[in-house]
Amino acid sequence: MSIITTTFKDASQWRSFIKLASPILLAEILHLSSTVVDTIMAGQYSAVDLAGVSIGGSTLFPLMIFVVGVIMATTPSVAQAFGAKQLLHIGPIVQQSIWLAISLGLLGILLLRFVEPIFDLLLITGEVRDIALDYLFVVAFALPAITLMQSLRSFSEGLGITKPMVYFGLLGVMINIPINYILIYGKFGLPAMGGVGCGWATTISAWVATLGMAGYIFWRPAYRHYGFFERLYWPQFKAIKQLLKVGVPIGISIFIEATMFAIVALFLAPLGATVVAGHQLVLNFTSLCFMLPMSIGITLTIRVGHAVGSGNAQAAKQLVVIGSTLALVMATATCSLMLSFPDLIARIYTQDQAVIDVAISLFFLAAMFQLSDAIQVAGAGILRGYKDTKWPMLMIIISYWLIGLPLGYILGLTDILLPALGAQGFWIGIIFGLSCAAILLCFRVIYIIHKPLTQQQVINA
């Protein structure tokens, strides 16, 4: 009987996978909903504030996603140790991850102080520039909280405990929304800050959620069997190096994808606030939809990591079938949604008809890459469970920076192949880039799962 037939007949495996993935999905949606709230509230305040928050967010996001990606190496490291029943190795791994998270968070604050030359190069001027810079200055202080949260999250998720991220994701949203409202519109005697108020709300809610997660881990008995609380481990170069060996390719891979979207927003800035706002609207909604396959990818990393750690190759293959199938089903649903209700979705964000018209023209293209995006994110999640991150990174660099972004630039801003298509040209390039990544990562997954686990380059941090 084939592995596919066996997997589809094993209902318990599906139930177990979905049970683990569901809290991750809710947590991802809650995490992104803060960005959605920022976009909607800034858009309702003014198109200029929406454009400023868009450019500021597009500048912050690649850096944030890189440092978070590096810390994500903690998840497969914990998961493999858990699968191998090396429980007392987990605490030292997490402590080294925390040291790394603090360092990267502080470094991120410093780097965001030097973005003005980038804005000069891209001719971003006027009020939009001022809002974007002020937003970045404030939200930079959320980075250490975000990286620490990822370390704590990886600790919990690597053990297969996923519900706490829902609790503290919800806490963050419950704090973010009222503070957004108060600071953007100037309530209770405070001055109206517009888009900059979003930055303050994001920073405050990030720190509250992170401190809440830390307290939860400290007080819950479920986390006390893994050598985390017995003693303090000072930074150890060898352990941090092992995390970086797995994490830097993850960070670069996610950074590459994020920069493709962020650079598009920056390239579109000279075309005006309306085009940027329409692009950001569609990007924001597709990012929300992306949380569906992303939750599957994270679950695959955890469950495949457990299987690899325990030496169960058959279970790992079954997980590949389950995760890939669920990711494709979810992508089909989001694709149908974008094709059926583009006008309704756009009006959730803004009532500016010019922005809505731009967004509607892009939703068809955004729907086209949902399947490719689902395949590539599931493939990446599988490979991270094996701690196979170097080759996927190279494949993503080729797909996004050497194919997707150059093609998007040619189609969007030049007349080399067609009359310049503006935002639509960039989104066509994105479709090609994601499709290439999906194909290459599929080949890599097939290659990896057919290798005996004894040949895997497992890194025991």
Image: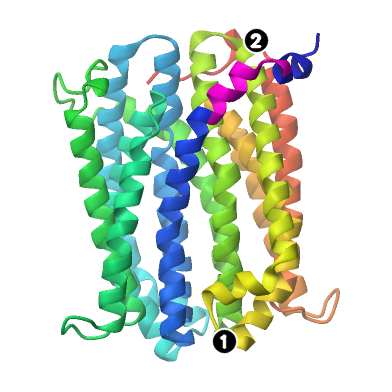
Please, which residue is most extreme toward the bottom here? 126
Q: Position of residue 205 (x, y in %)?
A: 27, 58
Q: Name the kind of residue labelled 2 in the image.
A: Pro
**Category of crowding for the residue at label 1, using alpha-carbon neighbours closer than 10 angstroms: few (below 14), some (14–19), many (at least 20):** some
Q: Which residue is mark 2?
A: 452
Quadrant in which residue 92 is drawn = top left
- SS of the residue under disc 2: loop
| Residue 193 seen in this snapshot | no
- Picture layout, residue 45 above or below residue 244: below
Q: Residue at x 22, y 19 (%)?
A: 224
Q: Nearer the viewer, residue 382 or 294?
A: 294
Q: Bounds of the magenta span?
A: 9-18
Q: Nearer the viewer, residue 88 or 364?
A: 364
Quadrant in which residue 325 is drawn = top right
Q: Nearer the viewer, residue 287 or 67?
A: 287
| Residue 98 seen in this snapshot | yes
Q: Which residue is mark 1?
A: 352
**Category of crowding for the residue at label 2, using alpha-carbon neighbours closer than 10 angstroms: few (below 14), some (14–19), many (at least 20):** few
Q: Residue at x 66, y 27 (%)?
A: 322
Q: Position of residue 436 (x, y in %)?
A: 75, 47
**Which image quarter is the C terminus in?**
top left
Horizontal placement of 199 versus 2: left or right? left
Q: Position of residue 219 (x, y in %)?
A: 17, 29
Marks 1 and 2, Cα distance to the nearest angstrom? Answer: 57 Å
Which label lies toward us, 1 or 2? 1
Q: Position of residue 381 (x, y in %)?
A: 57, 34
The overriding secondary structure of the stretch rendered in magenta is: helix
Q: Name the kind of residue labelled 1 in the image.
A: Asp
Q: Residue at x 32, y 25 (%)?
A: 239
Horizontal placement of 432 versus 306: left or right? right
